Structure formats: structure tokens, C-alpha cells
Amino acid sequence: MEKHLLLTVSDDASSHSAVQFVGQFFSHKGVVKITLMYVAPNPEDILGTSGKTPTGEKRTEVTRQSAQYQKKGRAALERAWEKLLAAGIPPSNISTIFRFRSFNTTVKDIGQEGEKGLYDAILLGRRGISRFEEMLSDSISKQILEETLTVPIWINREIGLERFGVLLCVDGSNPSLRMADHVGFMLAEEVHPITLCHVQTKGGPDPASVFRSAQSMLEENGVDAKRIQTQVLTGSDPASAIVQETDAKRYAAVAVGSSGEEHRGLMGRFFMGSVSRSLCSQITGASLWVCK
């Protein structure tokens, strides 16, 4: 079944980490459809002419800046396109979107496209990550994201070579099961093993019950039971335990759902929670998948 990914691109080389991950992770590249998206600053906003018809020198400057941003954006999209082709993604599976920013932040444009386009995931590189983190200081923007952004996000920071498998962190919550559903859908035709990981805490749920629910979700998506393993971790710092497990086993991706007390939304409570924020800032080498 086709997987449709929205991959954000910038003129900064850091955005290539998401491109690199896609090229390395998927073995069945023919079912991977990728839309590359570049969001450029809006010259009319910069020059204070938004909502007005620019005239004279301002019109000339808007035209000049628009051409400049388009040139940079098209070049960045072409570089990402070429890297995907080199990684084996069929050219017919790649499309591009260039647009000038419609909102006061690039993040909102990405989020709107992610929802409208019915993508299976939004992929961010390091620059995209910092933009999302900046949103957390804006309560209005955070509320918008909490209410509208339901597409899983793959955060790609310094992707490592020769990594394999997915560490699926589960706790029995609904967000955790939704992430299991997402992992199952994305990996049904792949060969990556999936390790169900539960960090045992005092008074927490029975790991066996948690694993049964998550495994059932994976198998419903077509994942062979032989590819599924389980791992119980302990420790006073769950995030550190997950990071250590990820590094020790060299997983390609770590998948988590916002859970526990973090039910207010993906970009709100998820990243504000101590465990989740630690994962976002500490995990390198592997892709971090998060969902609401």
C-alpha cells in the first residue's frame, strides 16, 4: 500500500537529514510517494504591503525578492529531488510544492498542508525541528497546532548509517496504540524488526497486557508476528533509558505517542513533557516518530 510523506525542505543542508532517512529506511521504495515542500518568506509581509497592492519602488522590490526566493527554493527542491532519485525513489513518486508563507510562521503552512494533503507523516530536518520548538513559546500558535495537527511527525536529527529496526515505545494509552497503528501501516511491507518497548514504573500497567494490545494492532496491519519482539526497561529516567536502548541496539527509528499526563496535544504537552522533550533533544542517529 502506498505511503505518502510530506518532506520539508530548506536551502539549509540540515534539511537533507530527512531525505537521507527516507533513502536508507525504505527497501520497497516503489510504494513511497514523497511531496517535497519549500516555504519561502513572503516579500509582501517583509515590506509591509501584505493585503495591499504594492506600487512604485515597493512593487519593484516585491518582484525582485519574489524572484530571488523562488530561485533559492527551486534549487533546494531540485537538490532534494536528486538525492531521492539517487536513493532509488522513482521519479514518478516525487512531487514538489513551492509556496510563499501564508501565515506568520512557516510551521502553520506545513501543518495546514499536512492536514489538507492527507499525508501519512510529516518529515522534519534539524531546521524544521527548531521552528516547531519556537512555536511552543506562542500560546495561540500552540493551541492551533494542538487542535489541528494530527499527522504523525518524523523528526530527523543527524541520521546515522547502518541502523535497522524500530523501537516502538508503548504504555497502553490511546496515543500509544495510534502510534502502533501508524508503525504497523508504514512497516507492513518492510523487513525492519519492531521491538515493543515499555518503561516499567511503580504502579504502572502490566507490560504483558500493554504488549498484547500493541502487537495486535501491528498484526492487524499485516506485520508478521515473527518480526515483533518485546523489551521491558527500568530506571528513574525513562527518556534516558529509551535513548540508551536506542543507541545500544542502533535502531533506525523510535516511535512514541503522547500519553500519560501529556494529553493536550502533540506540539503542546507532548514536547513540554519532560520525558518527551528529552527524547526530542537527546535522540541522534535515529528518527523520532511522534503522534497525538
Image (cartoon, rainbow, N blue to C red):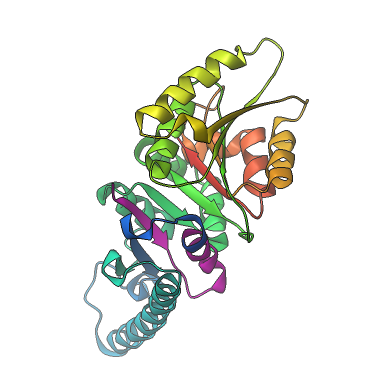
Residue drawn at the location 52% of the way across and 65% of the way down: 20
| Point 47% across, 59% down: residue | 22
**Residue 144 visible at all:** yes
Name the one closer to the observer, 230 or 120: 230
Q: Residue at x 72, y 47 (%)?
A: 247
At a point 36% along the width and 34% down the height, the residue shown is: 222
**Where does the image place residue 98, in percent across and percent down from the top left?**
31, 71
Quarter assignment of residue 152? top left
Magenta stretch bounds: 1-22
Percent from the top left, x then y, of residue 191? 48, 46
Residue with the most extreme top position: 203
Residue 128 percent across, percent down from the top left:
51, 59
On the rendered structure, is 217 left or right of 232? left
Which of these two is toward me, 3 or 149?
3
Q: Nearer the viewer, residue 238 or 25?
A: 25
Question: Which residue is the extreme one toward the left?
Answer: 53
- Figure quadrant of the C terminus: top left
Q: Is residue 20 magenta?
A: yes
User: Can residue 257 be seen in the rendering of this structure?
Assistant: no
Furthest residue in direction front, as rendered: 226
Total numbered labels: 0
Residue 196 on the magenta segment: no
Between 72 and 245, the one nearer to me in the picture: 245
